[in-house]
């Protein structure tokens, strides 16, 4: 055997170690064959006669280190388990949902009277938007908007950021491990004093595996901060769903507005054609000396008015298309655009339900409630700041002056410790508690205000739905009457009974009434959409698909 080989040197070191650990004046349990020192000595003898392999020797040399690591891990496992058992408390005030500051029933009165809704009509939160909107083209456009709208993408990114922040805060509850390795070689100046025999060039190598400073959350400070971050994540998800509902509602209303303006444009173009024909007739009569110049100028006035209306509605149609493209996030195919209101299939009939059942399911109300819960949790964190913070650290590794000896027996190092930090006087702690309580009251007030605003939105939508049908019926009757008046006035003018001024007045009144009818028919359709959005929509029934919703549902289920 080569005496200078590392293997031979290790054998000599093992011999010395087993000899020193087995020296005793009396016979004890250390001399029994089962003792580790005796087993290692027997291994050395087997090695001397060639019965033990080099791998067995290496295993024997690492055995004390492995036993030390096992003991340390066991102690830390027990300590971590104990810490987790005692950190379940929190100093946050218990959350109780505030009473909704709105009436228990929707408003009643003449504005809310309408035909009784059929039995089985779904309540809005139970009706998915695909069931509510029956127009197939509109469904396709809404699908495009949900995929491409940039505001919705921003809301989704805010959700991802809030979720990541929750993960960061939640990780504070658990210890973090680290591994480190280092080496240094330095050469001292000959002019500096040093111990006799101390070399001028020295080396040091070390490796460590340990736990960074870990705060044991005895008083729930970190847990309260984690709960606050979780509620902020929930609030961001509800904000995304509120934005999604707003996008659906806005796309539907923009689609209907485009249909109404296109119909009004067609009406203006038809009126312009009629006025142009009438003006040409009066122009011929004037040339023949039958009509006066006053008749000619009176015929020109409605012609110019109709031309102005054509230009105005042409502008509105272009702006409606631009608004719809912006909402969708991409140009809408021309074949999906409506031509008039008659081609738009009305939305499905819905019921309002009870305020207590409906308003609390609106995404914006849920967002405000999540922010209120976060404020409660922040109060708990501010209270816990008055109590001690206890943190633990630990490390295990090896150190040596020579790299070849770094992992040999006797080079192991370890340490562990605890620290308690008790605040005695800190004005910032008291101010922080006051701030958290004020923020709690702000969140409560905002929550109540959100519910009241939601109640007002629903009440306005119900009032519009309760009266718009009567307005449309009355306006249709007015259009029919004015159409008859215009027909009679034109006939009397052609027979020479009345002047053309009577025809102009009748035609002007008819055109205005027809424009009003288009606007009311648009309001009739839009009132259903506004009511659907005001009641919270079917935001929890499948139109919010994706990884964000699955993650949100899984986290919400476990809370």
Image (cartoon, helix red, strand yellow):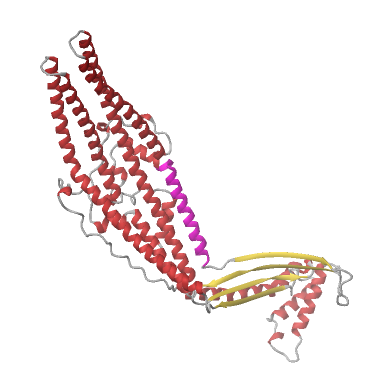
Does residue 75 sit above or below 289 in this rendering?
below
Q: Is residue 158 magenta?
A: yes
Dividing the picture into quadrants, the one containing residue 51 is bottom right
Q: Measured from the top left, where is residue 312 in percent x and y?
A: 32, 29
Frontmost residue, 3 versus 276: 276
Q: Measured from the top left, where is residue 331 in percent x and y?
A: 42, 34
Please report the residue visible at 21 percent of the width from the left and 45 percent of the height from the top.
465
User: Left or right of 157: which side holds 54?
Assistant: right
Question: In this view of the protein, can residue 56 be seen by the observer?
Answer: no
Question: In this view of the protein, can residue 469 be seen by the observer?
Answer: yes
Frontmost residue, 551 versus 62: 551
Does residue 47 sit above or below 319 in this rendering?
below
Does residue 399 sit above or below 542 in this rendering?
below
Give the residues in magenta. Answer: 146-172
Please report the residue visible at 70 percent of the width from the left and 64 percent of the height from the top.
181
Dividing the picture into quadrants, the one containing residue 271 is top left
Q: Main secondary structure of the magenta part?
A: helix
User: Left or right of 57: which side holds 389?
Assistant: left
For the N terminus, the quadrant is bottom right
Residue placed farthest to the top in the image?
288
User: Left or right of 426: which side holds 456?
Assistant: left
Frontmost residue, 309 versus 162: 309
Q: Measured from the top left, where is residue 78 in percent x and y?
A: 54, 76
For the C terminus, the quadrant is bottom left
Frontmost residue, 419 versus 520: 520
Residue placed farthest to the left in the image?
497
């Amino acid at each position: 055997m080569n005496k200078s080989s590392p293997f031979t040197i290790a054998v000599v070191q093992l011999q010395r170690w087993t000899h020193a650990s087995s020296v005793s004046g009396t016979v004890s349990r250390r001399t029994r064959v089962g003792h580790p020192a005796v087993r290692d000595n027997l291994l050395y003898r087997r090695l001397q006669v060639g019965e033990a392999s080099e791998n067995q020797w290496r295993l024997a040399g690492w055995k004390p280190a492995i036993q030390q690591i096992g003991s340390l891990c066991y102690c830390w496992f027990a300590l971590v388990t104990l810490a987790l058992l005692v950190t379940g408390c929190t100093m946050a005030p218990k959350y109780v949902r505030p009473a909704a500051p709105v009436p228990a029933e929707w408003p009643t009165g003449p504005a809310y009277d309408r035909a009784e809704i059929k039995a089985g009509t779904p309540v809005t939160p139970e009706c998915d938007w695909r069931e509510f909107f029956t127009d197939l083209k509109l469904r396709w456009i809404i699908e495009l908007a949900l995929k491409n709208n940039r505001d919705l993408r921003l809301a989704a990114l805010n959700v991802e950021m809030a979720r990541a922040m929750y993960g960061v805060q939640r990780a504070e509850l658990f210890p973090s491990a680290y591994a480190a390795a280092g080496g240094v070689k330095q050469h001292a100046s000959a002019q500096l004093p040093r111990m006799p025999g101390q070399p001028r060039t020295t080396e040091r190598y070390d490796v460590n595996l340990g736990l960074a400073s870990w705060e044991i959350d005895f008083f729930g400070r970190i847990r309260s901060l984690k709960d606050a971050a979780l509620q902020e994540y929930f609030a961001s998800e509800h904000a995304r769903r509120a934005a999604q509902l707003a996008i659906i509602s806005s796309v539907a209303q923009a689609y209907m507005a485009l249909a109404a303006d296109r119909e009004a444009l067609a009406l203006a173009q038809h009126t312009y054609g009629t006025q142009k024909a009438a003006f040409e007739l009066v122009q011929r009569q004037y040339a023949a000396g039958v009509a006066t110049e006053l008749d000619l100028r009176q015929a020109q006035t409605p012609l110019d008015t109709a031309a102005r209306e054509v230009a105005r509605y042409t502008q509105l149609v272009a702006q409606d298309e631009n608004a719809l493209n912006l909402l969708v996030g991409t140009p809408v195919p021309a074949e999906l655009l409506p031509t008039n209101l008659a081609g738009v299939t009305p939305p499905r009939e819905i019921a309002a339900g009870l305020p207590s059942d409906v308003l609390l399911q609106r995404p914006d109300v849920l967002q405000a409630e999540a922010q209120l819960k976060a404020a409660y949790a922040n109060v708990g964190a501010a209270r816990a700041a008055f109590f001690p913070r206890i943190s633990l650290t630990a490390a295990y590794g090896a150190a040596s002056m020579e790299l070849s000896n770094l992992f040999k027996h006797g080079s192991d190092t370890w340490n562990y410790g605890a620290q308690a930090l008790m605040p005695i006087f800190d004005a910032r702690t008291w101010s922080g508690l006051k701030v958290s309580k004020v923020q709690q009251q702000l969140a409560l007030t905002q929550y109540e205000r959100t519910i009241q605003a939601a109640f007002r939105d629903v009440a306005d939508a119900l009032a519009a739905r309760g009266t718009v049908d009567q307005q449309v019926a009355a306006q249709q009757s007015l259009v029919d009457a004015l159409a008859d008046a215009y027909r009679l006035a034109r006939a009397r003018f052609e027979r020479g009974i009345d002047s053309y001024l009577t025809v102009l007045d009748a035609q002007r009144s008819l055109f205005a009434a027809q424009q009003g009818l288009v606007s009311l028919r648009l309001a009739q359709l839009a009132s259903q959409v506004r009511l659907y959005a005001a009641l919270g929509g079917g935001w929890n029934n499948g139109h919010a698909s994706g990884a964000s919703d699955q993650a949100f549902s899984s986290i919400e289920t476990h809370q």
